[in-house]
Every structure is written in C-alpha cells, then in structure tokens.
Image (cartoon, helix red, strand yellow):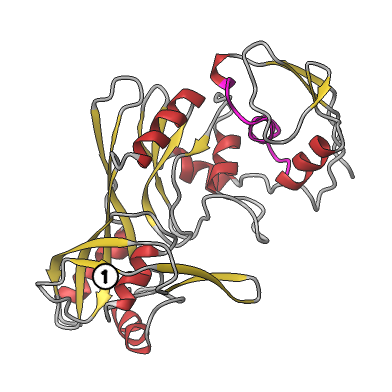
Amino acid sequence: MAEGRDVQWVEVGEGQSGQRVDNFLITRLKGVPRTLVYRIVRKGEVRVNKKRVKADYRLQVGDLVRIPPLKLAPREAVKQVSEGLRNLLAGSVLVEGPGWLVINKPAGLPVHGGSGVKIGLIEALRQVREDLEFLELVHRLDRDTSGCLLLAKSRPALLALNDALKRHQMDKRYLALVAGRWPVRREFVSARLDRFDAGNGERRVRVDAAGKVARTRFAIREAFPKATLIEAEPVTGRTHQIRVHAAHAGFPLLGDDKYGSREGESLARHLGLSRLFLHAESLTFPEPSSGRPVQIRAPLPEELEAVLSRARGGR
C-alpha cells in the first residue's frame, strides 16, 4: 500500500537560509529516501518561487518551496525508528546547546543510511527529534565506532562548526585497544592513505604513496601483557585513518574485521571482545555563537570496560 502526502508550500526562514534544497527536503520529508528526493527535484516537481531548481540550489530567506505529494512504496521507505532505538538515542545525548548537540553514538549504528542500510543515526534522530527543523552531521564516525558525535541544529551553527574543522580548531581523541606492546617512542604515524574498491562494492583504505596526506598522534594509556590501550588523535581526518595507521605501524586494533590480524582476532576472542575497540572519548570545539571552548567526554561502554578488566587480570 502506497503512502500519500499533500502538496506543501514552505517559506524559508533564517534557520534554513543558505541550505541546499536537497538537504532541506531530506530534513523535512522524514522517511523519504535520498534517491526519491533527487528524482522529484530532477523532474521539476519541486519548485522554488514557482521555478525549477537543481539539487544544489541554495535557499534564501523568503523563498517559497513547493513540495509535491509523494507516493512512497513500502520497500522505498526509510525504516521507521523502533521503540528500542528511539529510547536508546533519546538517552544518548551527552550535551545539547542552542545550535548543536553531542550524542554518544552506539557501536553498530551507521551515521547515515545507504548501501543497503535503510536507516542511520541521522535519519533516526530526525524522527526522534520532531521539534527540530534542521539537523545535520558535523563529522562522521565509522559504523562500529562508539562515542562523541557532533550534530548541528541550525544552518549558521553548521557553517561555524565546519569552519572550525577546516581551521583545525576541533580536537578529537579516541581510545583504542591494539594487539601487541606499542613502543613508548612511537608518538606519530605519518602515511598517505588511498581509498580503493575491495570488491563487492566495499570501500577500504590502504597506505599508498599516491594517497592523501594523513597523520595521527598516538599515546600509551595503559599497557598489558599482549595488548596496549592507546589514545589516538587524528591530525588529519581521513576515512579509517586510526585503524589503518595502527595496522601499518604493526599494531592492529582488536575487533577490526577489515584491517586486523589473526593474532588480534585470537586475542579479541580470548578477552571476550565482540566489536571494534575504538571509542571517540572526547571532543573539544568552539561554541558556534560565543566561540568559547566546549569539551565533551563520552564514558567508555561497559562492554569495553569489561574487556580492559579481563586484560588487567592477565586473561
């Protein structure tokens, strides 16, 4: 059974000024996949001030946007948030400001849908937070990584936070458990990274002299007989950077099914680790409106704390 929607006429306010029309539609049309949004824009069914526009058109205050009635087949719809996920996300907000919020992202939840995933954290949060007209990711975390994730609740906040990222005014620290004893003197890993197709549509990253410059700072937090808890600070922000740099240095992350080692897999099983041990522990950024520094910390999940306890016990 198809789902119908009436024609909507929406006037753009200050909070949406400068936003791309495709992102504006994705935010308003909760449950509608991106492919359908791009289709109705391309066909001219979406009008701004009675004129056709492209998906990258930037809205201005006072623009009148026509959103057509949609017929959405169940197989096309973005999955609705389950009650369990709704409660989990509602309880995962660490701190919320006037134009932003930081959530403690659960491991196993992708930050956005796509590639066979009908719902990600951003789509789910847009359903949970119906009070927000605008909600966008400021940065991303890997699907299996937990911890601090920053989102913007207004267009001006998003622009300010994106600018802070470009100016390296945002500090992100991760905790990772790696196989082996990390050398005390190994403080940095600098190795260019390149993305490639690993087959079956899967994208991976490898060290390649022709890749993009990437640098990560590492520090030992705690040493165990067969593993090391390290703090990782990505100086650059490449995909899978911490995981690939650690593996390149000879100390792959435990629980890493893409860049791990057989020894690491065996140790992970021994310690009872069933996920990637990578957690975004802290995030520091300038508050968009005042510029004052904001520092947020996400506690290590109980399952990872339990793994560390077993490692300390010499298991």
Q: Quadrant of the C terminus?
A: bottom left
Asked whether residue 227 is drawn in magenta, I would say no
Residue 197 percent location from the top left of the image: 59, 73
In this rendered view, identify the residue nearer to me: 206 or 16.
206
- In which quarter of the view is residue 39 placed? top right
Residue 205 percent location from the top left of the image: 47, 70
Residue found at the very far front of the displayed protein: 210
At x 47%, y 46%, the residue is: 88
Q: Residues in magenta?
A: 16-33
At x 45%, y 40%, the residue is: 138
Secondary element type, mark 1: strand
Q: Is residue 252 visible?
A: no
Q: Residues within 10 Å of mark 1 (few under 14, many from 20)?
A: many
Residue 196 percent location from the top left of the image: 54, 72
- In which quarter of the view is residue 21 placed? top right
Locate residue 267 relative to residue 230 in the image: left or right.
Answer: right
In this rendered view, identify the residue nearer to me: 50 or 84.
50
User: Is residue 138 shown above or below 7?
Assistant: below
Looking at the rendered structure, the kind of residue marked 1 is Leu
Residue found at the very far left of the displayed protein: 184
User: Is residue 314 shown above or below 32?
Assistant: below
Q: Quadrant of the N terminus?
A: top right
Q: Is residue 75 visible?
A: yes
At x 28%, y 54%, the residue is: 235
Tell me the residue that label 1 is attached to. Answer: 177
Residue found at the very far top of the displayed protein: 62
User: Is residue 300 shown above or below 127?
Assistant: below
Locate residue 3 relative to residue 20 in the image: left or right.
Answer: right
Residue 141 percent location from the top left of the image: 43, 54
Asked whether residue 17 is drawn in magenta, I would say yes
Locate residue 206 relative to residue 187 in the image: left or right.
Answer: right
- Number of disc labels: 1
